[in-house]
Amino acid sequence: MLVPLLGRDTSELRALLQKEGAPAYRGGQLAEWLYRRRALTFDEMSNLPGALRTRLQDKYEVGRSRLVTACHSQDGTVKLLLELRDGARIETVGLPYADRFSGCLSTQVGCPVGCVFCATGQGGFTRNLTAGEIVDQALAIQAEGSDRRLDHVIFMGMGEPLLNYEAVMKAARLLNNEVGVAMRHITLSTGGIVPGILRLAEEKSQLGLAVSLHAPADNLRRRIVPNAKWPVAEVIAACHQYIRLTGRRVTFEYCLLGGVNDDLEQARQLAALLHGLNCHVNLIPYNSSGTARFREPSLESIRAFRRALANLGIQVTQRLRRGRDIEAACGQLRQRIDKETRL
Ligand code: SAH
Ligand code: SF4
């Protein structure tokens, strides 16, 4: 089986080419073709000698995924369904905003955390993605999404990034050094994996942290996020540590499920929990088109929850519903296409 090259940085490519008998500087050219020019095949790499390209072709492949479907939303959001070398399928989303073009990348095929409202979590877990498969998504979004340069990345697609720590951090470094996305503009979103948050804190990297909390108390959180076994207090303590060591603010995501976690008592508990933390809360109204197990929160309850947090001194924003016409919530496109394929 051919070995994929995507996922190696310039110095690894230099070493690899030297091993193949080529001068090291060819590694820099190869990196340029892989990450900046988004080559799909060795044939495109016109400044590499033909003999070297043939030699590479015998052992290696570029390692790009296959585009299954691209859905373009009226608001500019583009959602891609990609097929990996082993046939597994993942989603990735490009989100153009007035001031940036952001890629929302998957980190696993499926997710073991099993959140009850999430189509990905309900579909179970298959495997971790490699660093190359993660970076590939950014390249696919750039190719399909917009003339603008992808300048922000969030690891907030399918999967739990902190349960695939090494590959995700390698992908972040590749995005930073090879693709050109500033580390400060890369954010990781976690369901609350405490050892991973602490490890990230120790790295003192500029990578941003978002924590999907969804409930201020353990009994409710255990029902919504069944397989994240750390108590809320430990999650918050780990966030304190992250803020202390990195000096960065943490974002808490809170998916509002109608009648489950959206009443004012929960808003008050949440404000008390986050008191004194350098953070802000991003409210995400539940999108029911993938797993219709819950009610979407009413506009009135969203507004009241938001106002209660703000009145208690918590900075709060609300996620815009992007790409609703193309099913952009986590795991929903894959779910639909899989269903259609089965029919
Ligand atoms: N596993 C990580 C990152 C991927 S999930 C995490 O949980 O943070 C990213 C976000 O997608 C989560 O914050 C979750 O709130 C949101 N999400 C998933 N399904 C959703 C749905 N049906 N409606 C609204 N938000 C959803
Ligand atoms: Fe996994 Fe995030 Fe979905 Fe929860 S919301 S199941 S952690 S992908």
Image: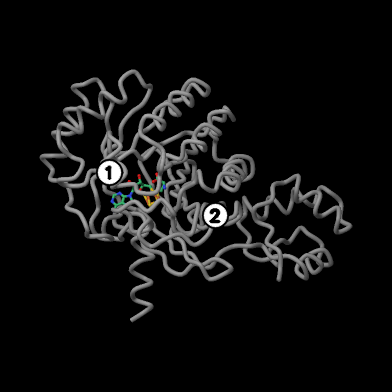
Mark 2: which amino acid? Leu
Tell whether 216 sits left or right of 53.
left
Visual colour scheme: one colour
Tell whether 191 sits left or right of 37.
left
Mark 1: which amino acid? Cys
Residue at image point 53% right, 59% down: 127
Judge depth for marks 2 and 1 and give the one in front: 1
Which structural element holds mark 2?
helix
Residue 316 location in percent, x, y?
A: 27, 30
User: Which dot marks residue 329?
Assistant: none
The one of 246 and 17 positioned closer to us in this rendering = 246
The one of 209 and 80 positioned closer to us in this rendering = 209
The residue beneath circle 1 is 255
Tell whether 117 sits left or right of 18.
left
User: From the viewer's perspective, is residue 125 above or below residue 313?
Assistant: below
Q: CB atoms at circles 2 and 1 under 8 Å apart?
A: no
Which structural element holds mark 1?
strand
Residue at image point 59% right, 62% down: 64
Residue 208 location in percent, x, y?
A: 47, 33
Residue at image point 58% right, 42% down: 169
Q: Is mark 1 within 8 Å of ligand 1?
A: yes
Name which quarter of the figure residue 285 lies in.
top left
How far is the residue under mark 2 from the one under mark 1?
Answer: 29 Å
Residue 303 location in percent, x, y?
A: 15, 36
Q: Residues within 10 Å of mark 2 (few under 14, many from 20)?
A: many
Name which quarter of the figure residue 329 lies in.
bottom left
The one of 291 and 155 positioned closer to us in this rendering = 291
User: Which dot marks residue 139?
Assistant: 2
